[in-house]
Image (cartoon, rainbow, N blue to C red):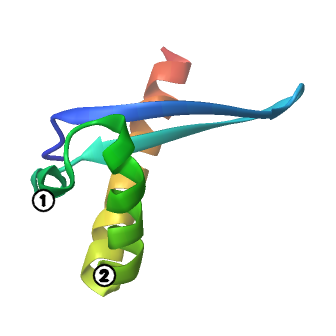
């Protein structure tokens, strides 16, 4: 999928509920920096400037690939 690095974040909202965020780092994101502090500006840029058909199609493909892989791991 062309992803070299991924940031993982864990956020616990309550004692029985949590979120795991996986943020891939693509080449275009480097202009925002490479630290964890750059994630928010990257996500805002993506939402405001990249939220259209072609990119959404790529995101859906990546989700399907990740889901397939996670399901494969679960049944192994």
Check the image and report above or below for 65 versus 51.
Answer: above
User: Disc 1 on helix, strand or loop?
Assistant: helix
- Tell whether label 1 touches label 2 (CB within 8 Å): no
**Residue ID at (88%, 28%):** 16
**Residue ID at (38%, 80%):** 48
User: Disc 2 on helix, strand or loop?
Assistant: helix
Marks 2 and 1, the one that precedes in the sequence: 1
Q: Nearer the viewer, residue 35 or 24?
A: 35
Q: Residues within 10 Å of mark 2 (few under 14, many from 20)?
A: few
Look at the image and tell me whether residue 61 can be seen: yes
Q: Position of residue 73 (x, y in %)?
A: 46, 21
The numbered dot on residue 37 is none
Q: Position of residue 62 (x, y in %)?
A: 33, 53
Q: Label 2: which residue?
A: 49
Q: Is residue 44 left or right of residue 75?
A: left
Disc 2/disc 1 C-alpha distance (Å): 13 Å
Snapshot quadrant of residue 49: bottom left
Q: Nearer the viewer, residue 68 or 28?
A: 28
Q: Residue furthest top?
A: 76
Q: Is residue 65 left or right of residue 75?
A: left
Q: Position of residue 44 (x, y in %)?
A: 41, 68
Q: Residue furthest bottom?
A: 53
Q: Position of residue 47 (x, y in %)?
A: 41, 74
**Residue ID at (54%, 20%):** 75
Look at the image and tell me whether residue 65 can be seen: no
Check the image and report above or below for 16 versus 33.
Answer: above
Q: Label 1: which residue?
A: 28
Q: Residues within 10 Å of mark 1 (few under 14, many from 20)?
A: few
Total marks shown come to: 2
């Amino acid at each position: 999928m062309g992803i070299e690095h991924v940031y993982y974040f864990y956020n616990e909202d309550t004692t029985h509920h949590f979120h795991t965020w996986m943020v891939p780092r693509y080449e275009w994101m480097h202009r925002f920096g490479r630290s964890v502090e750059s994630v928010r500006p990257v996500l805002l840029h993506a939402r405001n400037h990249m939220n259209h058909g072609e990119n959404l199609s790529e995101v859906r493909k990546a989700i399907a690939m990740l889901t397939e892989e996670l399901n494969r791991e679960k049944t192994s």
